[in-house]
Image (cartoon, helix red, strand yellow):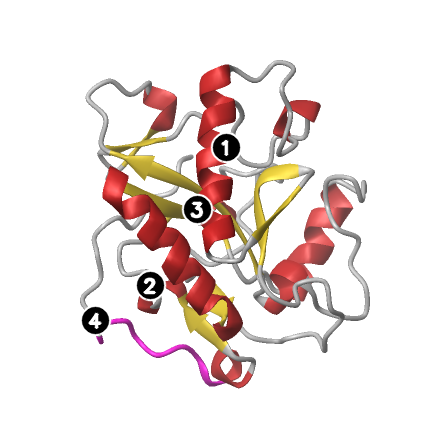
Amino acid sequence: MRAVATTASVPAGSVPPVSAAAAAGGLVDVRSVVPDAIIDLRYATTNNFTRTQLYPADARCLVHESMAPGLTAAAAALRPQGQALVFWDCYRPYDVQVKMFQVVPNPAWVARPGQYARSHEAGRSVDVTYASVSPQCPPQRQISGICLADMGTDFDDFSARAKAFATEGVSEAAQAGRKRLRDAMNYGGLSVYSGEWWHFDGPGAGVDRPILNAPVD
C-alpha cells in the first residue's frame, strides 16, 4: 500500500497548530517551514518494513524547531531545478521505535531504544528524498503525479546498497541523485548518516534528551 502523499503547497498561516505536547517539545509541522514539502509518511501506512501501520493515518511530519533553518535552506537549494523535498519520516514517538527494534533487532539498521530520546525520537532527524515532474517515470517511482528521484534503493532497504556512499550495485544516475540530495541538505547544515542515504541529522541529533510523549497527529 503506497501512502497518499500530500503534494500541494500550503499557504502561509494555514498549517494547523501542533498539539500542546508537541509545542512543549519544540516540535513544528514541517509544512510551516517548507510549504512545498511532499509528505509521504511510510509508517502511517503498511508500506514499510514492519508491514504494519505504526502511525495514525492523519500523522503529521513534525520536526524540532532547530531544524527549521536547515530544511528551509535545503528546500531552497532544490527549487531552482524544479525539485521538492519528500519526507518519509520525521519525529518518531519512542513507543514506535521500540516496535521497530522488535521487528528488526539489529542496531546496524534500527537504532536500539534507550531511556532517552535522540535523532528521530527527538524530532532532530528526517528521512527524505526529492521529487520533480518527469515525462518518463517508472510506476514504482510515481507519487501523486510527480516522480521520485532515482536513488538506487527504496526507503528502509536493509542492504549494503542503502549506504549513503555505496557504489557497488548503485548506478551512476542513482549516485548522482544521492549527491544532489546530500548537497542540498548540507547547504542547510544537515548531515547524512553514512548507513542510510535518506537519513539526515540536524543540530544536536546525537544528544540524549528526555523522552517526548507527543503524538504525531
Residue topped by disc 2: 31
Q: Find the distance from the CA under tag 3 to the CA under tag 2.
A: 18 Å
Segment colored magenta:
13-20
Q: Is residue 106 above or below residue 44?
A: above
Q: In whole angstroms, how far apart are the C-alphas of marks 1 and 3?
A: 10 Å
The correct choice, above or below, for 99 with respect to 163 in the image is below
**Residue 138's quadrant in the figure?**
top left
Q: Which residue is mark 4?
A: 12
Distance from disc 4 to disc 1, alpha carbons, whole Å, reads 30 Å
Q: CA distance from mark 3 to mark 4?
A: 23 Å
Find residue 63 and name its label: none
Helix, strand or loop at disc 1? helix
Q: Residue flagged by tag 2: what amino acid is it?
A: Arg
Q: Amino acid at mark 1?
A: Arg
Return the residue at label 3.
Answer: 184
Q: Percent x, y for residue 128?
A: 47, 45
Mark 1 burial class by Cα count in 10 Å: few <14, some 14-19, many 20+? many
Specify which label sits upstream in the sequence, 3 or 4: 4
Magenta-span inclusion, residue 14: yes
Residue 38 place in picture, x, y as percent? 33, 49
Whole-Å distance between the Cαs marked 4 and 2? 9 Å
The residue depicted at 46 percent of the width and 52 percent of the height is 187
Identify the residue at image location x=50%, y=66%.
67
The label shown at residue 178 is 1
